[in-house]
Image: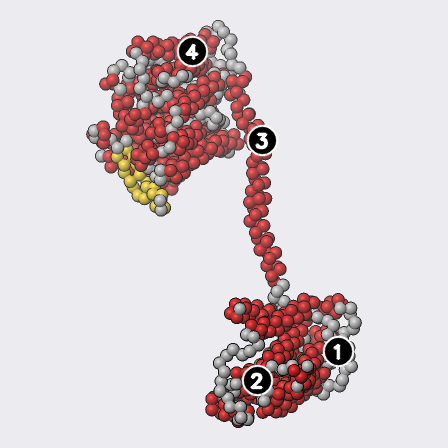
């Protein structure tokens, strides 16, 4: 059963290839169904491999399948291989599962778009890349997937590239990611130079021989890659702009899967992080928690429904890195899975709202939608409660785990980390509630040129219209529920968001399913905390309380309208960070780039051209020896004769 | 004492002749200087008991070879005077040539000095009483007879070759070398520039003795203007080597 | 006094060397092909003188035999060389050694 590992990435790859060549002929909706079925097949294969792994005992839960030798270059031997161990199968399961649901949703969402097949080409390629990333048995296959998801992200963000803003957003994402990729590459070079292999198995066996400096360098460089991919400070600027892509893209790539690749990478190389200096995890934790806090503050003042969710993603990713930094890898993975469920749910719900509101994305023009889109509203609110950390939804268990480990991690700044995390939880509750209240409650605020709104029972039965952004053709002018293609995934995800906490409930050692499952991978690097049960309960209560306080505050401001909303300009402009980056790159950045370009053109090229010029000059001089005058040649011959004779005569006779 | 005087006189004659060959602008004078050198050499041969060789030297060298030279000089009218003041290859040629010649001289002298001015090879047995011509004949016809016969063959070949080369052929077509005019102009210009550097005292005009055979070449007899004139009058002619090969 | 100076064979060698070097110099300096030829003859004569001297010093007839051969070969060479010069100068009167440069291209 474990041999089926190769099927997991192979099916989406097959889907990609088929759609690449025959997609246009298959057309809508067959192309979409093919893509979805491929993802579903991949999910089935993941379940099969998972069952196979469960069949092994704990020590043997590691299976490497090598397909073929990819780079046989002397000392560097890289195979295309897949490593099926608890961590990678966990990732594969939820990646394929959520992908299937989102593909299904996208069939409905992208209906009527002229490039329908192309969308699914990219989506399947993305799923393949993501699976290569998580299943890779060495750093290079992981990097292959890493780059692949980056490329697909670029293509999908700028899917409607006829608009300059969309194209620019795609470019921004790719370029920012590239900075992280550079760190990843340097880490690979360093690993190969010191250890001699890029295989995870080989690396982790040799990790004890690494000098702390080297392990730190590799770890920090990989973290740089993670910062780029998972949108942490200072490389998060691409994620809000990435909302220019279609909503299924935002849900899949920028909520559930690609952005979690950084966290996955950190978890995967936890031995290396453990072998470095002690301050390395601190750096990770601090960057994570600062990002979480800053992003939450920005989300408070955003008016685009998707931008709120984007900053929320950045914030939740910050939580995951906080967990990694304090050694709570299980909590990080747990939160990743829960976040995948509820964030995908929230994004798909937002997509449903946008679709139902005829491409309106500004929350100030929505309101009272729960009457018109009850299913969407219900599922959205499930996701809302999950992210706010309200028990018994999934988000509560995972976020609580993180805060618990932060408190108990034993560093000097443990409590500070915990406190910032707590404030962020409060803000999370606040801005998510704000979003829910603005969109689904209150009086309808959309434009008055619509006819009298019709209750949902009529609207849901109607056919939904196409989503193409360029079309201004409106068949229906009132908000309505989308078709079953889009609502079914919402329901499934809502169920998962409710029940997902079951993975790692904290009550009893026995129900720590996730922790036990991941133990072979994490081993000794998982932190142990000594916190009494009473303290745990108290901390949990405080965390819930923070969420509820935020919720209540938002209700007061946005629902009851007792207090005027506080949405400062600086937050709406995201602390002017984008402007600062632009100014830097345009100003000092540009100057340094131009200096380097000048250096390259004049010094480097100058040296090369200089060599050519010298040779040319020398040649010109030497050419004059060939004058064609035989007497000069005769003179040369005679000189040679004298020299040779002189040499021999003086050498021999004296 | 006698030997000393003989050596001095003959040596002086040799050297004077040599200098004359090198320094005469008129080829006829050079040939005559060569004769002087040859006579001096012959005398020196006699002084060293190589009487036969002295005679042969005079008869063959001075009597035949130099006469041959003079024949050619007169035949071609190459008796116009060279302009020795000009050196188209620049002054470096002369200086370096002098240095090289002195170098050769120095080398030989140094080698001689190193051996103490004595011959260091194995000394052969030669009966001093036998006249040199007997010894020479014996050597030539016993030990060196093979080389002797081959040299006779060589002479035959040389004669055949000479007859072939010096034939005059009437030819109809002419080979045109496209770039020849420019190259000719370039060489002419070079010579003109060198002459200008040397003061431009005229294109080396000397007396122009009447030449014997003037049929196949046209224009003026002047050395340099003949150069220049070549380009215009006979510019489209093929190269002499080609002619020589075809004839 | 003067009579006491003995003419050793070495003097002849020195004279031969001097003639040879003068001949080399002339070969490199003169442009007229005939005069260049004469310089070559000069060099050959120097060599024959040297050979004869050595023949006497080493008391071997081989030196004189070689001189005979040198003479024969010189004669043959002069014949052929002058024939070439005739052919050359007939075509192009006033040509010198420098005109070989016209052959470039």
Residue B162 visible in rendering: no
Q: Residue A107: x percent and y percent? A: 37, 30
Cβ atoms under marks 1 and 4 closer than 8 Å: no
Q: Is residue B21 left or right of residue A38?
A: right
Quadrant of residue A389 within the rendered picture: top left
Q: Is residue A158 left or right of residue B14?
A: left
Q: Are marks 3 and 1 on the same chain?
A: no
The residue sitting at 27% across, 14% down in the picture is A507
Q: Vertical placement of A300 versus A466: above or below?
A: above
Q: First in sequence, mark 4 or 3: give its number.
A: 4
Query: Which label sits on residue A550?
Result: 4
Residue depth check, mark 4 versus mark 2: number of the one nearer the observer: 2
Q: Residue under label 2, please give it.
A: C52
Residue A42 visible in rendering: yes
Residue depth check, mark 2 versus mark 3: number of the one nearer the observer: 2
Q: Residue under label 3, please give it.
A: A588
SS type, badge 4 = helix
Q: Residue under label 1, please give it.
A: B222
Q: Mark 3 belongs to which subunit? A: A
SS type, badge 2 = helix
Residue depth check, mark 3 versus mark 1: number of the one nearer the observer: 1
Cβ atoms under marks 3 and 1 closer than 8 Å: no
Q: Are marks 4 and 2 on the same chain?
A: no
State how far apart marks 2 and 1 are (Cα). 44 Å
SS type, badge 1 = loop
State how far apart marks 4 and 2 are (Cα). 126 Å
């Amino acid at each position: 059963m474990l041999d089926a590992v190769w099927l997991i990435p192979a099916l989406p790859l097959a889907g990609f290839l088929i759609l690449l060549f025959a997609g246009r002929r298959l057309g809508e909706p067959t192309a979409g169904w093919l893509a979805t079925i491929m993802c579903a097949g991949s999910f089935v294969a993941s379940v099969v491999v998972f069952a196979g792994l469960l069949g092994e005992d704990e020590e043997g839960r590691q299976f490497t399948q090598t397909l073929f030798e990819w780079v046989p270059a002397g000392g560097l031997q890289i195979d295309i291989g897949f490593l099926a161990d608890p961590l990678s199968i966990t990732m594969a399961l939820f990646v394929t599962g959520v992908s299937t649901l989102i593909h299904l949703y996208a069939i409905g969402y992208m209906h009527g778009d002229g490039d329908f097949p192309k969308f699914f080409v990219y989506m399947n390629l993305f799923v393949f890349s993501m699976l290569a990333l998580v299943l890779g048995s060495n750093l290079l296959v992981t990097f292959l997937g890493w780059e692949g998801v980056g490329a697909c992200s670029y293509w999908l963000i700028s899917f409607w590239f006829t608009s300059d803003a969309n194209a620019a957003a795609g470019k921004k994402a790719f370029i920012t990611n590239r900075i992280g990729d550079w760190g990843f590459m340097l880490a690979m070079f360093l690993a190969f130079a010191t250890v001699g292999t890029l295989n995870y198995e080989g690396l982790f066996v040799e990790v004890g021989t690494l000098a702390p400096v080297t392990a730190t360098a590799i770890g920090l460089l990989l973290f740089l890659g993670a910062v780029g991919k998972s949108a942490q400070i200072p490389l998060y600027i691409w994620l809000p702009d990435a909302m220019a892509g279609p909503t299924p893209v935002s849900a899949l790539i920028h909520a559930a899967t690609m952005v979690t690749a950084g966290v996955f990478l950190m978890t995967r190389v936890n031995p290396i992080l453990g072998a470095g200096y002690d301050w390395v995890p601190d750096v990770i934790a601090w960057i994570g928690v600062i990002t979480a806090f800053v992003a939450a503050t920005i989300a408070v003042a955003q008016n685009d429904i998707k931008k709120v969710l984007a900053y929320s993603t950045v914030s939740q990713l910050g939580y995951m890195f906080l967990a990694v930094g304090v050694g709570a890898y299980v909590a990080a993975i747990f939160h990743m899975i829960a976040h995948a469920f509820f964030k995908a749910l929230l994004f798909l719900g937002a997509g449903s709202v946008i679709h139902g509101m005829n491409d309106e994305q500004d929350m100030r023009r929505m309101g009272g939608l729960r009457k018109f889109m009850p299913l969407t509203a219900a599922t959205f609110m499930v996701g809302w409660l999950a992210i706010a950390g309200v028990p018994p939804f999934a988000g509560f268990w995972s976020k609580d785990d993180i805060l618990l480990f932060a408190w108990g991690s034993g560093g000097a700044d443990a409590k500070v980390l915990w406190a910032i995390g707590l404030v962020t939880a409060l803000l999370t509750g606040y801005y998510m509630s704000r979003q829910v209240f603005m969109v689904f409650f209150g009086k309808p605020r959309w434009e008055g040129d619509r006819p009298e709104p019709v209750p949902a029972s009529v609207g849901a039965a109607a056919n939904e219209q196409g989503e193409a952004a360029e079309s201004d053709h409106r068949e229906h002018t009132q908000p309505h529920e989308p078709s079953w293609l889009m609502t079914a995934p919402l329901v499934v995800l809502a169920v998962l968001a409710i029940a997902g906490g079951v993975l790692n409930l904290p009550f009893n050692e026995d129900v720590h399913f996730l922790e036990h499952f991941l133990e072979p991978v994490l081993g000794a690097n998982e932190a142990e905390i000594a916190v009494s049960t009473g303290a745990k309960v108290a901390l949990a209560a405080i965390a819930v309380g923070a969420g509820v306080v935020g919720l209540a505050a938002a209700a007061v401001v946005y629902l009851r309208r007792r207090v005027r909303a506080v949405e400062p300009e600086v937050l709406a402009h995201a602390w002017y960070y984008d402007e600062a980056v632009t100014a830097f790159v345009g100003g000092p950045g540009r100057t340094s780039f131009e200096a380097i370009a000048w250096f390259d053109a004049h010094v480097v090229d100058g040296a090369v051209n200089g060599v050519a010029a010298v040779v040319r000059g020398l040649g010109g001089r030497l050419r004059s020896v060939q004058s064609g005058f035989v007497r000069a040649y005769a003179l040369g011959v005679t000189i040679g004769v004298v020299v040779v004779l002189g040499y021999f005569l003086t050498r021999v006779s004296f | 004492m006698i030997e000393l005087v003989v050596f001095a006189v003959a040596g002086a004659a040799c050297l004077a002749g040599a200098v004359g060959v090198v320094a005469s602008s008129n080829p006829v004078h050079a040939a005559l200087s060569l004769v002087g050198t040859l006579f001096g050499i012959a005398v020196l041969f006699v002084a060293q008991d190589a009487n036969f060789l002295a005679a042969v030297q005079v008869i063959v060298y001075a009597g035949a070879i130099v006469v041959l030279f003079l024949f050619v000089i007169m035949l071609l009218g190459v008796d116009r005077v060279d302009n020795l003041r000009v050196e188209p290859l620049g002054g470096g040629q002369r200086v370096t040539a002098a240095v090289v010649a002195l170098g050769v001289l120095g080398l030989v002298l140094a080698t001689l000095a190193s051996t103490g001015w004595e011959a260091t090879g194995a000394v052969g047995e030669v009966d001093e009483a036998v006249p040199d011509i007997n010894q020479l004949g014996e050597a030539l016809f016993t030990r060196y007879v093979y080389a002797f016969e081959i040299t006779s063959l060589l002479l035959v070949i040389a004669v055949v070759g000479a007859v072939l080369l010096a034939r005059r052929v009437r030819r109809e077509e002419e080979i045109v070398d496209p770039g020849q005019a420019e190259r000719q102009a370039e060489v002419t210009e070079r010579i003109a520039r060198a002459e200008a550097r040397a003061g431009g005292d005229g294109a080396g005009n000397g007396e122009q003795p009447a030449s014997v055979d003037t049929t196949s070449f046209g224009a003026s007899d002047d050395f340099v203007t003949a150069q220049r004139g070549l380009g215009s009058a006979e510019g489209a002619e093929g190269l002499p080597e080609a002619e020589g090969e075809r004839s | 006094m003067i009579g006491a100076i003995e003419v050793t064979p070495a003097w002849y060698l020195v004279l031969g060397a001097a003639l040879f070097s003068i001949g080399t110099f002339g070969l490199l300096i003169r442009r007229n092909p005939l005069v260049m030829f004469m310089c070559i003859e000069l060099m050959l004569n120097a060599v024959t003188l040297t050979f004869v001297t050595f023949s006497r010093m080493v008391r071997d007839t081989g030196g004189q035999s070689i001189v005979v051969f040198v003479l024969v070969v010189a004669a043959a060479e002069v014949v052929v060389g002058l024939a070439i010069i005739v052919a050359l100068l007939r075509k192009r009167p006033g040509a010198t050694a420098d005109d070989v440069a016209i052959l470039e291209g």
